[in-house]
Amino acid sequence: MKRIFTIKVNGELIELPDPNEELSSKEVMEIYSNTYPQLLNGYVEEKGIRNETEMVYEFLTISGTKG
């Protein structure tokens, strides 16, 4: 099944292609952290199957507060 990875940037949901189907979703997130550094403190959530042919994963970030 094809994997689709998404990330929300400035309120916009962006779809990212699967760089290598043999990698775990966490490893894919580590690759994309080079482009999206907020993923360094993020996690992956499986969103489910879309169109019966794609498994969708969402990269989520952990927001902290300074103080």
Image (cartoon, helix red, strand yellow):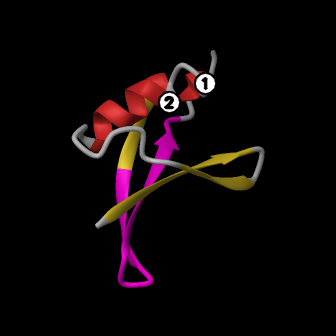
Q: Nearer the viewer, residue 26 or 40?
A: 26
| Image location of residue 22, percent across then percent down | 22, 41
Look at 50% across and 25% down and name the residue there. 33
As helix, strand or loop, the secondary structure at mark 2 comes to helix
Q: Quadrant of the N terminus?
A: bottom left
As helix, strand or loop, the secondary structure at mark 1 comes to loop
**Disc 1 crowd, CA 10 A, few/some/many (<14, 14-19, 20+):** few
Kindly tell me whether residue 41 is visible in this rendering: no
Q: Main secondary structure of the magenta part?
A: strand
| Image location of residue 48, percent across then percent down | 35, 72
Tell me which segment is drawn in magenta.
Answer: 45-62
- Circle 1/circle 2 CB separation < 8 Å: yes
Where, by quadrant of the figure, is residue 42 drawn? top left
For badge 1, the amino acid type reads Thr
Q: Tell whether 46 sits left or right of 58.
A: left
> Is residue 46 highlighted in magenta?
yes
In this rendering, the answer to whether 48 lies above or below 31 is below
Look at 50% across and 48% down and name the residue there. 17
Residue to which mark 1 is pinned: 35
